[in-house]
Structures are given as structure tokens and as C-alpha cells.
Amino acid sequence: MNIKQLTPLSVQQILVFSHVVDLQSFAAAARLMKVSTPTIWAQVRSIEKAYKCKFFKRVGRNVVPTQDALLLRETLQSVLNTLESSVKLINREGEGGITSLTIVTGIRMIMEELGTKLRYFHNAHPEVTLKLYHGDDMTAQEMLVEGKADLAMILEPPEDRKNSRLLFTPVYDLEYLLVLPPGHPLENMAFESLAQTVDYPFIVGHAGTYSRQSFDNALYREGLAGKLKITAETNNSALTINLVRQGLGLGVIAGISSGRLLDGLHTISLTKIFGKVRVVAVWKKGTVQPPVVNELLKIVKEPMS
């Protein structure tokens, strides 16, 4: 079967199919869409007839989607995202353009490299209100999928932590840094490996965060797993930096050595051990981005002076 042989689907049918897959219930989908259960059943049958495929199996009171159904659901999500974003975009443009932009990112990024970039953007678009939220990579992805944010800028997560409904595009690179309090003995030493740090307490990311996974992997490679003393765990670099300043230990962050939050502290690049870390912009697949978003990303990608 090719696309010419496929019976055209309505937006209503696509929504019905998606809700049945997600809820695994005709009745629940009917309540959500405020129609009768037979109407939902008929719409699903029409889609199955169009694709010449059985998409659901009855298990008790629920309907379980087949692998083909899950694959189609994933594909149709981009169509729904495109339709939804196009309606929002046209409505906004008809009302005089974009008036707000919701972004989720990290506290340190907002306070350092993104802060200046956002000021440039505001100067160019004073009519747009920026709504900023803090969140790690998983929180940011959840907000995007749930429609609570337009855009996220986060450290690029590993492939198995990327939501398949989202698009990830590189914007700039950071490096991992070892952050030392003033006058620390390591400040005047040639740094070669993490083995030089085993006598000092550490502040690191929470277990499960990408930065912590990278740190634990590096310790394992150097035979240091379980040998470092961890005094505190945080979920963002700004907190880590502050705890280093308070004397709780050495910190490991992804950032820039010239960052304002690091004033008065000493940093050592861990690039040889960890490699670079990438910041990515994230949004829903299929979303029609308004021009101001593309302008913001262009500003963010420009090298900092």
C-alpha cells in the first residue's frame, strides 16, 4: 500500500486513535473527547480499515495497542504537534505576534552565559515576555511533552534518556570543571588525574543525573570507584558552586571557567578526562517554531565575547 491508496484521515480520527493508544480504553477516550464510546470504536475501525491492520487487542476491560499501533502513534504525534503549533502561531500572529516564550533551563546557565544572550534578545524583542523555569533534563523534557514549555536548553542527555517525541539540536559546548576554594593545595599543582583528589571531600550531582554518571564513569576508568568522600549532592551547578564557596569540598560542574558565579574560586579543566559537554535546544518534533525562537537560537549560538 502507498500513500495514494490510503484513505484520508481526519484530525478527529488522529486524535481518537492517539487517545485510545495512550489511555488503552475506548470509554476513557470517549469521556476525554466528550463523545459516545461507539463513536470512538467506529473511528478506530475506520483507521484500521484504512491501514488494513489490526491495532488493538482486547484484554479484560482494556484495549492493548500492538507494536504497529505504537509506531503509528509515534508518527502521528509529529502531525498533531505541527497542527497544534500552527494554530497557535497563526492565532498569535493575528493578534499581533508572539507575546510570551516559556523556556526551561538550568539556573547556572541563566545566571551566566544565557543571561547576556537573553538581554540581547529582549532588546530586539521587548514585546516578548520571557517565562523562565529551572529544570534538569528529565523535568525539561516532561514540560515540553506536556505543553508547559515552548523551548528547553539543557545539557545533552544520553540517547536512552532522550524522549522520542522531542527534537534535540546543538547550540554550544561547555567543559567539565573541577572547582576549588581559594588557596586549595591543588591550585598550584600540575593536574593529571582524579587520583590527585582522593584526599579531599567532594560535592557532586545527585545519583542519576548526567553529570554524576559522567563523573562516576571517570572514577571507574581510573580505578577510583567508591574511594572519594562525598559530602553533598546537588541537582544544579549553581548550588555546587555555592557549597564549594562555603568550604564543603571540591565541586565538579559543567560550565565556563570565566563564569561570574566562579569569581574568587579556582577551576581546573577536566576536558581530558570527561571530554566536552554539549548544550542542546529542545522542542516537540513537528512543531512550527515562530520566527522569534529561531532568532533567539541564533543569538545563543553566537560566540561569547
Image (spheres, rainbow, N blue to C red):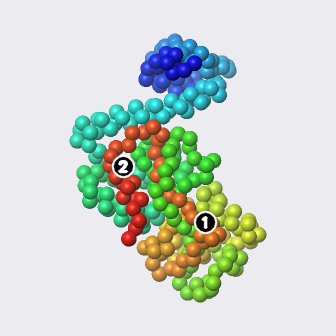
Q: Picture quarter containing residue 71?
A: top right
Q: Classify residue 119 as left or right of residue 281.
A: left
Q: Quadrant of residue 23?
A: top right
Q: Which residue is mark 2?
A: 293
**What's the amino acid at mark 2?**
Val
From the viewer's perspective, is residue 236 above or below residue 163?
below
**Which numbered disc covers residue 96?**
none
The quadrant in which the C terminus is found is: bottom left
Is residue 3 in view? yes
Residue 234 in the image, given as x and y percentages of width and height = 57, 63
Q: Earlier in the sequence, mark 2 or mark 1?
A: 1
Quadrant in the rendering for residue 24: top right
Asked which secondary structure carries label 1, the reply is loop
215 horizontally vs 296: left or right: right
Residue placed under numbered mark 1 in the picture: 275
Label 1 is placed on what type of residue?
Answer: Gly
Residue that appears at 57% across and 64% down: 276
Residue in the foreground of this view, choosing between 1 and 266: 1
Is the residue marked by circle 2 packed among few (<14), some (14-19), or many (20+) residues within 10 Å?
A: some
Point 33% across, 46% down: residue: 291
| The N terminus, quarter of image | top right
Residue 282: x %, y % from top left: 47, 48
Disc 2 is placed on an element classified as helix
Q: In the displayed structure, would residue 98 be above or below residue 181?
A: above
